[in-house]
Image (tube, grey):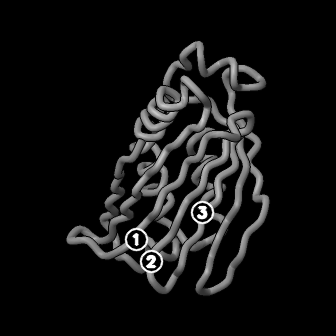
Amino acid sequence: MKFVEEHIFDAPLEAVERMYFNTTFCPRKYEELGLEDIKIVDSSDDPVLYFVDCSFVMEPSLPLPGFVKKFLPGGQKISVRQIDRWNTKTGKGELEIQLHGLEKVHIHSVMTLKAHERGAINIMQWTVECKIPLIGNKLADFLGKDIRSKSADDHAASVKILQDYL
């Protein structure tokens, strides 16, 4: 499954870059979103090739179909590892999400952060793939819907945090 999400910010690109390229941004956003057990696994403050690798526990925003539940150890909550990487010079980045218990699921986004008529925009080109026989496409479709259902809350949390960078 492939889809595009756009987060538009009514703020200068430079302020949005300072926020996105700060190691504290992702864990703070996850906290704003009510995620649990948030940890920074690894990070780099390299001025050009920035990354932050976090783990957390979350509940899906959509009710889990029965076929999904049998793949998730621990019931309704999902252990997640998310790695955000950015080239701070080009504004190009990528995001990788790993779901504990669902190692055959690949969630990836190519991101472009650039100026927009309202200020700045992050364009996220998502790919969700699942290589589990028989149910792979259904599971990828469910996960794509779950990502899209969280997008507005994710954007709202980012906008709130952005106020500290203006």
Question: Which residue shows up at 61% across the image and 50% down it?
Answer: 97
Label 2 with label 3: CB-CB less than 8 Å: no
Q: Where is residue 117 in the image (x, y as percent from the top left)?
A: 20, 71
Question: Which residue shows up at 53% across the image and 54% down it?
Answer: 108
Q: Dot 3, crowdedness within 10 Å: few (<14), some or many (≥20)?
A: many
In the rendered view, tell whether residue 150 sits above or below residue 18: above
Residue, far top:
66
Q: Is mark 2 on a helix, strand or loop?
A: loop
Q: Which of 160 and 49 is in front in this view?
A: 49
Disc 1: which residue: 113
Q: Distance between the residues labelled 1 and 2?
A: 5 Å
Where is residue 65, by image quadrant?
Answer: top right
Q: Position of residue 44 (x, y in %)?
A: 71, 75
Q: What residue type is labelled 1?
A: Leu
Q: How many labels does the image show?
A: 3
Question: Which residue shows up at 67% across the image and 65% down it?
Answer: 52
Q: Distance between the residues labelled 2 and 3?
A: 13 Å
Residue, far left:
117
Where is residue 47, by image quadrant?
Answer: bottom right
Q: Residue 84 carries which label?
A: 3
Q: Which amino acid does label 3 sit on?
A: Asp
Label 1 with label 2: CB-CB less than 8 Å: yes
Mark found first going from the N terminus, 2 or 3: 3
Q: Nearer the viewer, residue 111 or 15?
A: 111
Disc 2: which residue: 91
Quadrant occupied by the C terminus = bottom left
Q: Nearer the viewer, residue 142 or 83?
A: 142
Q: Is mark 1 on a helix, strand or loop?
A: strand
In the rendered view, tell whether residue 155 sits above or below residue 18: above
Q: Distance between the residues labelled 1 and 3?
A: 13 Å
Q: Position of residue 26 (x, y in %)?
A: 61, 58
Q: Residue 143 carries which label?
A: none
